């Protein structure tokens, strides 16, 4: 079956198999990196990006720690 499929496409079995594996690898990666959001989720995501909430105390504290860390590392 694999030899026939390769022949139909005018390719070697090796080329056919490598191509099929590359396609499978791309699909596997896409399934774990592409977000599929419903319309209401898309709207919420974009609205949050366009109008982010004000930083809370934990975020301000983390930023302060980051500034202190980068100041000591860059000396």
Image: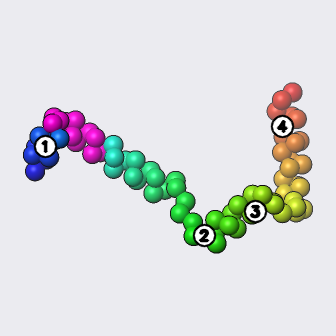
Q: Is residue 72 left or right of residue 6?
A: right
Q: Tell me the quadrant of the picture where the C terminus can be found.
A: top right
Label 3: how many residues lie within 10 Å, few (<14), some (14-19) or many (20+)? few
Report the disc number at residue 70.
4
Q: CA distance from mark 2 to mark 4?
A: 40 Å
Mark 3 or mark 1, which is nearer to you?
A: 1
Residue 70 appears at what percent x and percent y?
83, 37
| Residue at image mark 2 | 39
Q: Nearer the viewer, residue 48 or 54?
A: 48
Q: Is residue 44 left or right of residue 59?
A: left
In the image, residue 20 lies in the stretch drawn in magenta: yes
- Residues in magenta? 10-21
State the SS at label 4: helix
In the image, residue 75 lies in the stretch drawn in magenta: no
Mark 1 or mark 4, which is nearer to you?
A: 1
Mark toward the start of the polypeptide (2 vs 1): 1
Mark toward the start of the polypeptide (1 vs 4): 1
State the SS at label 3: helix
Q: Are marks 3 and 2 in contact (CB under 8 Å)?
A: no
Report the disc number at residue 48.
3
């Amino acid at each position: 079956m694999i030899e026939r499929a390769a022949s139909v496409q005018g390719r070697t079995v090796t080329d056919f198999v490598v191509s099929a594996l590359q396609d499978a690898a791309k699909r596997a990666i896409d399934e774990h990196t592409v977000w599929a959001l419903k319309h209401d989720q898309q709207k919420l995501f974009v609205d949050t990006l366009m109008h982010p909430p004000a930083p809370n105390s934990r975020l301000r504290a983390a930023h302060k720690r980051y500034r202190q860390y980068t100041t000591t590392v860059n000396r």
